[in-house]
Image (spheres, rainbow, N blue to C red):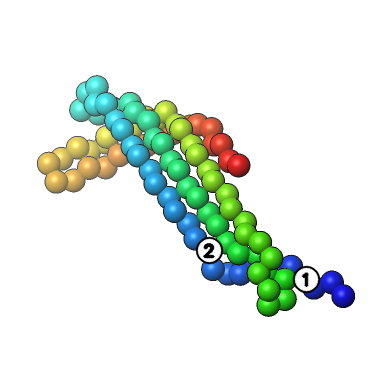
Amino acid sequence: MVLPIRRLNLATVISRTILFFKIDNPRAAFGGIFTYTRYGEDVESGDMKIGERRRTYVSLMPSLKYNYVNGKNFALYSKVAVGMMYTD
């Protein structure tokens, strides 16, 4: 008899992001974004745990930020970043 494999709905997600921007003028800033995410869950067959599923994602992206409004207590801006992601 073969039992169907199903995953538990409980998952562990750890995510860290670091942003850095160098302000060249009051309107535009150039920088980068580094993101690390780790995801994990248990895999079950019937009521028995038969394994674990783990994934890690790492991204490094250069970015540009443009300020439309740059007040003392308020800012309105757009940010764009393009990069690659590594996963195992």
Residue placed at 31% from the left, 33% from the top?
20
Q: Give the vertical position of 47 relative to 19 (above or below).
A: below
Q: Position of residue 14 (x, y in %)?
A: 44, 53
Image-based side of 43 in relation to 66, left or right: right
Check disc 1: other Cα within 10 Å, few if <14, some if 14-19, many if 20+.
Answer: few
- Please give left or right for residue 12 compared with residue 67 in the image: right
| On screen, residue 77 above or below 40 | above
Q: Quadrant of the N terminus?
A: bottom right
- The residue at 60%/64% (across/down) is 42
- Label 2 packing within 10 angstroms: few (<14), some (14-19), many (20+): few
Q: Residue furthest bottom?
A: 47
Place of residue 5 in the rendered image (x, y in percent of width and height, measured from the top left): 74, 68
Q: Which residue is mark 2?
A: 11
Residue 59 visible, this orientation: yes
Residue that appears at 58% across and 41% down: 87
Spatial CA distance of label 2 from label 1 is 20 Å
Which disc is residue 4 wearing? 1
Q: Is residue 70 above or below residue 48?
A: above
Q: Amino acid at mark 1?
A: Pro
Of the 4 image quadrants, the one containing the C terminus is top right
Which residue extends farthest right? 1
User: On the image, which quarter does residue 36 sit in?
Assistant: top left
| Residue 53, x across and y down, in percent | 62, 56
List x then y, in percent, for residue 55.
57, 49
* Whether residue 80 is visible: no
> How many numbered badges does the structure rendering display?
2
Of the numbered discs 2 and 1, the one sitting upstream in the chain is: 1
Q: Residue at x 22, y 38 (%)?
A: 69
Q: Secondary structure at mark 1?
A: loop
Q: Quadrant of residue 64?
A: top left
Say what amino acid the circle numbered 2 marks.
Answer: Ala
